[in-house]
Amino acid sequence: MKPDRRAAGKSKMRSRRAQVLAAGCALLILVTPGSAGASSLRPAASTVNLTWETMWSGPTLLLLKQMTTAFNASHPGIVVTETNIPSATGDAKLSSQIAAGDPPSIFTEWNPVIGEYAAAGSIISMNPFLKGAYKNFKSWEYPLAAATGTYKGQLVGIPMSLNSWALYYNKSILKAAGITSPPTTLAQLTADQAKEWVIKGGKLQQIGMYPGANGFEYFATFFGALNCFNSAGQYDYANTKTCPGATKVMDWLTNFKPYPYAQVNSMNATYGAVAGGDDDPFVAGKEGFNMDGPWEGAQNVPDANPAMEGNFGVVPFPGTVAGPSTIGQGNFNIIPKGASDPAAAFEFITWLAGFNNVKFTANMDPQGGWVPASPQIAAAPAYQNYVKKFPWMSTYLEQMSSKYSQAPVLTTHESQAENAMVTASNNVEDGTMTPAQGLTYIDTRANSNT
């Protein structure tokens, strides 16, 4: 079995989220006192002090400071202070703080552990706050956003931004390979990417496409296989009768066995994708197709390789089920058990999402290529101006409203399932496991109580 490459895959995903926030540092924030809009759920007599704990670092911290300053100025009676901890130890520290009875008021979570926290009672339900001015909050969000933050009917996480994934293509590489238009079927994509690989003298010079460590997790929704469980609520991807799409994902991943995964990883490292840089093989003009979020075109390309601007397009991934679609993910704010003043924390969290704060958020989200938490923000003039500047952004917005997009069901074994998917994807891609073995491995590891 090949080594688990989860760390490399996750570092790129986390770095993209960090880059998204960092890009917003250039935003000029205009604060209008009293702009909160929503009725307060807290007593107005005294000042409430909230601690917001995040796992970001570097230039991102400037943006977080700007956000808290804007909120504090427009919400008399609440003072939010942001603190940050290393992402590698963030969840462990949060768990310790909750156990000690001294958690932060708000924690921003992007790892697949929200279901685990909810099942353990480590975070609180926000359902009690969905009243008054907030009674329609969940319907204000994109359905995908609401579903991704809901555990057994309880709202436990609210995104301040969402992720959406689509297929990037390099126009000049397509033309050089004799391809006249981006693929509209999975068979076309598989055949087209095969024409784009360039390996000379045993050295990789250009990639067609390579799903990598996140192969199964990110692509399952396009095959109708994101959520497969048996009657007992256990992961059941290996069951070909109830989850045929899982086999289709793995069968598709076997198409990448002929390609040198070690050299692909090396190229990723060279361009900074693994280490968290803005650059990656696609941005560098060395990859024909790449599955990524809007920050790739809105931020990474202009920052790292302006020559690529105008040389790429974005289309929905052509899976085996109807689309367009995406997997529901994002930066979710949660309220830990034992947090002081949860009502005020909820007020801050919804403000970060853009609720009764549409104008501010519509100006902020484009700075990092963010997909907003609500269609109201997407429809705002500032965001629509951004879409006019980057027309390909409309693909991501269409996916957020699509009935085919799916949110991963929050479970008590989320992180185990993701780790297993990463290992199985790598091993199926390089031929260490058969598709059936990969699915069995996912089910076994994901359902383990150890």
Image (cartoon, rainbow, N blue to C red):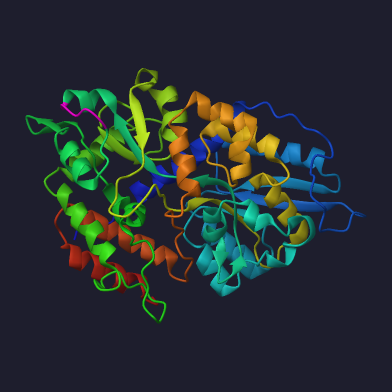
Q: Is residue 242 left or right of residue 253?
A: right
Q: Residue 15, relative to residue 131: is it above or below?
A: above
Looking at this view, is 193 or 283 the one in front? 193
Q: Residue furthest bottom?
A: 232
Classify residue 69 as left or right of residue 244.
Answer: right
Q: Quadrant of the C terminus?
A: bottom left
Q: Quadrant of residue 100?
A: bottom right
Position in image of residue 217 (x %, y %)? 35, 56
Is residue 41 among the parts visible in the rendering?
yes
Rendered image quadrant of residue 366: top right
Residue 449 among magenta residues: no
So how many labels did they put on this image?
0
Write down the quadrant of residue 196 in the picture.
top left
Q: Is residue 62 visible?
A: no
Q: Position of residue 368 (x, y in %)?
A: 53, 33
76 in relation to 251, above or below = above
- Residue that lies at the very extreme toward the left in this rendered image: 201
